[in-house]
Amino acid sequence: MKCEAGFTLIESLLGMMIVSLIITTIVPGYIITQKNMRMRYESLQATHVALDGIKRFYYEQQEEGHQVIEGTTYRWQVVEAGICVYYHEQSKCTTL
């Protein structure tokens, strides 16, 4: 049975199966990879904010503050034995 473009029905079905396989495997993997890269980037930015907070604590005696980097607010606070950075309901803490 020939379709309009001259392909047989089996060729058309095989082509659609390949396209659907690509869509269901590669595209979600790409989206997950992009999300992981964003999370790593935000974690790296949180480390940068923590280092900046440590400098401000030692030089300016400032115990808390915040920075906005690319639309994400990172709030840092000096705690009893270290510094914590809060962002997106996550936190990273380290000792001083």
Image (cartoon, rainbow, N blue to C red):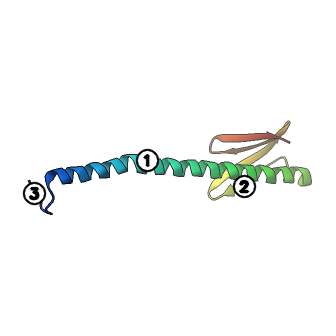
Q: Residue at x 54, y 49 (%)?
A: 35
Q: Which residue is mark 3?
A: 2
Place of residue 64 in the rendered image (x, y in percent of width and height, measured from the top left): 80, 47
Of the pair 40 and 79, the residue shown nearer to us: 40
Of the pair 30 and 82, the residue shown nearer to us: 30
Q: Earlier in the sequence, mark 2 or mark 1?
A: 1
Report the mark closest to the observer, 2 or 1.
Answer: 1
Cβ atoms at labels 2 and 1 below 8 Å apart: no
- State left or right for residue 36 relative to residue 73: left
Furthest residue toward bottom: 5
Furthest residue toward top: 80
Q: Is residue 65 visible?
A: no
Q: CA distance from mark 3 to mark 2?
A: 63 Å
Q: Which residue is mark 1?
A: 28
Of the pair 31 and 83, the residue shown nearer to us: 31
Quadrant where the C terminus sits is top right
Place of residue 82 in the rendered image (x, y in percent of width and height, measured from the top left): 83, 40
Report the mark closest to the observer, 1 or 3.
Answer: 3
- State left or right for residue 59 relative to residue 30: right
> Mark 2: which secondary structure?
strand
Q: Residue at x 79, y 40 (%)?
A: 94
Residue density around tag 3, few if under 14, some if 14–19, many if 20 or more, within 10 Å = few
Residue density around tag 1, few if under 14, some if 14–19, many if 20 or more, within 10 Å = few
The amino acid type of the residue labelled 2 equals: Gln
Q: CA distance from mark 1 to mark 3?
A: 34 Å
Cβ atoms at labels 1 and 3 below 8 Å apart: no
Q: Residue at x 91, y 54 (%)?
A: 59
> Mark 1: which secondary structure?
helix
Q: Earlier in the sequence, mark 3 or mark 2?
A: 3
Q: CA distance from mark 2 to mark 1?
A: 32 Å
> What is the quadrant of residue 60 in the picture?
bottom right
Q: Which residue is mark 2?
A: 67
